[in-house]
Image (cartoon, rainbow, N blue to C red):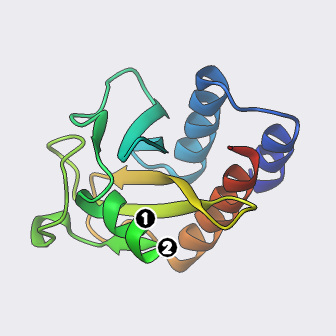
Amino acid sequence: MLQELGAFILAGAKGPADVKQMCEMIRDAGAWRWVGVYKISRGNLVIVAGSGDDPPCYPKFPVTQGLCGAAVETRETIVANDVRNEVRYLPTFNSTLSEIVVPAISAANRVVGVIAAESGKVNAFSNDDREVLERVASLMGHAFK
């Protein structure tokens, strides 16, 4: 999946339809419920696309809020093994139990967005999942302006 996704990104995938396809590929590979990509725009995190047909509860929110905001601020991956114990969690779907958020950093070393993946299971994300999502975020960060 990583090779296929990397080739897709490097071939110029950038628009919402392409990002949605990337989200679907990531979700299917990880067997998670939802994957979304947010870009930073004027101090907000704004959804570019997400897997599935249901929009997240917060399609736009200040870059200082939520686990996504924490990932932007720290420039590090955030793993919430049980979001019920995480005060920073902004619910995307009410049945989410764990989330991973990975910052996408541009070639100019700016955080330009995040990849967020959610699961209905506690402790859904392994170290391997983290590594794969960090590689994808790196490719996205260099592709997005």
* Residue 130 visible: yes
Between residue 77 and residue 117, name the one nearer to us: 77
Q: At which x and y percent is residue 133?
A: 59, 62
Q: At which x and y percent is residue 127?
A: 53, 79
Q: Determine which residue is flagged by label 1.
A: 72
Between residue 16 and residue 94, name the one nearer to us: 16
Asked if disc 1 and disc 2 are in contact, CB closer than 8 Å, the reply is yes
Left or right of 12, for residue 95: left
Q: Is residue 55 above or below residue 75?
A: above
Disc ID at residue 75? 2
Q: 10 Å neighbourhood of mark 2: few (<14), some, or many (≥20)?
A: some
Left or right of 43, for residue 131: right
Could you tell me which residue is drawn at 58 percent across and 24 percent down? Answer: 16
Q: What residue type is labelled 2?
A: Arg
Q: At which x and y percent is residue 94?
A: 14, 43
Q: Which amino acid does label 1 sit on?
A: Val
Could you tell me which residue is drawn at 68 percent across and 44 percent down? Answer: 144
In the picture, the quarter occupied by the C terminus is top right
Q: At which x and y percent is residue 68?
A: 35, 58
